[in-house]
Image: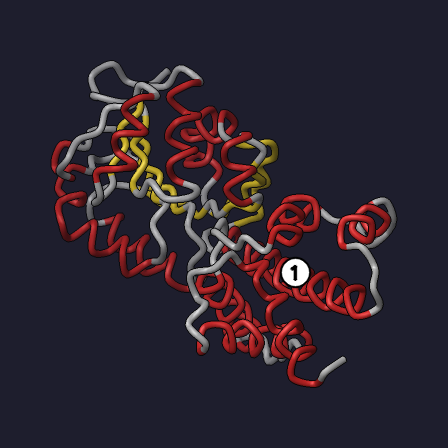
Amino acid sequence: MMEESRAADVAVIGLGAIGLPVCVNASTAGFRVQGWNRSPGPRQQAAKAGAAVPSTLDKIDAPIILSVLPDMPQLFDVLDGGLAGVIREGDVLVVMSTVAPSSMHILAKRLALLGASVIDAPVSGGDVGAWESTLSIMVGGETDDLAKCLQILQAISHRIEHMGPLGSGQMAKACNQMIVGATLAAIGEALTLGRAAGLDDAQLLDVLGAGLAGSRAMEIKRSKLLSSDYTPGGSVANQLRDLRIALDSAQTFGYVPRLTSVVTEDYQKLVDTGDSGLDHSAIILISERDRSRDGF
């Protein structure tokens, strides 16, 4: 594994929908794992899987730190709250969250002052992929830094692609989220049309999924769409954040993605109606509400 002089091989910061299964699976794979989270519930679940669960950040001691926090402000809060004090020279911080590509360079400058490195490694596959260790990981950063983390990342994923220099992984994730957001919106509109025409939801998804319209998003979100149980998974709020990152990134190249702009407006509508905590497949509610209003 890693250095025996350290308390753990890897630390996972943020035990949410992605972070908890990452922590559990890394521990199950035989790595010595520390898992940290502000609230105790996820810490208890991680401990049951064999991970150590220090209650304070100054007890973190691992050469590889996976950050699975919601966004960069939370990561900076954690650094200021004690994590920066235990990062050693040569350590690597892996940002698995979806953040703006430009923010990775700000973080890298801060880590360089500690003699440490950072790579971006956002994931696709959702909570289902995280539990099944079938995540797709998009990496940006130095090859040597990725090499230090590779065994751990391989244990929690199905595919790892080194996209290029720092920030490239986040740019790839922005592209990914453009497709995810638009796909879920299209599935929602198709189901709404099918319902208006009296088609059976499950049968429609079966036939669509067997053809060119089929997608991993349709497969993973099928049960939520059929049950109308929009417990997240990936949330509406996070999907909206990711789409705005994509739009902002596109703007740096003078490009305005038309479809992504429209889809972003629909996710904003869900946030405005108090639905930000629902699973992002709840975008179907926009077309369902249109159907109810327009009477079709």
Tell me which residue sits at (52%, 55%) in the image.
230
Tell me which residue sits at (49%, 49%) in the image.
233
Number of disc labels: 1
Q: To which residue does mark 1 refer?
A: 184
Dot 1: element: helix
Find the residue positioned furthest to the bottom.
294
Q: Front-most of 2 and 207? A: 207
Q: Front-most of 175 and 279? A: 279
From this view, report whether residue 176 is shown above or below residue 53.
below
Classify the position of the C terminus by image quarter.
bottom right
x and y percentages locating residue 179 in the rendered image? 66, 60
x and y percentages locating residue 171 in the rendered image? 54, 59
From this view, report whether residue 294 is shown above or below residue 6.
below
Residue 58 position by quadrant: top left
Three-letter code for the amino acid on which mark 1 is drawn: Leu
Residue 203 can be seen, yes or no = yes
Residue 258 can be seen, yes or no = no
Apparent side of residue 147 relative to residue 180 in the rendered image (left or right): left
Tell me which residue sits at (57%, 43%) in the image.
125
Tell me which residue sits at (61%, 35%) in the image.
159
x and y percentages locating residue 175 in the rendered image? 61, 60
Apparent side of residue 267 relative to residue 180 in the rendered image (left or right): left
Local crowd at mark 1 within 10 Å, few (<14), some, or many (≥20)? many
Residue 74 position by quadrant: bottom left
Apparent side of residue 191 relative to residue 162 in the rendered image (left or right): right
x and y percentages locating residue 126 in the rendered image? 53, 45
From this view, report whether residue 14 is shown above or below residue 208.
above
Apparent side of residue 282 relative to residue 31 in the rendered image (left or right): right
Classify the position of the N terminus by image quarter.
top left
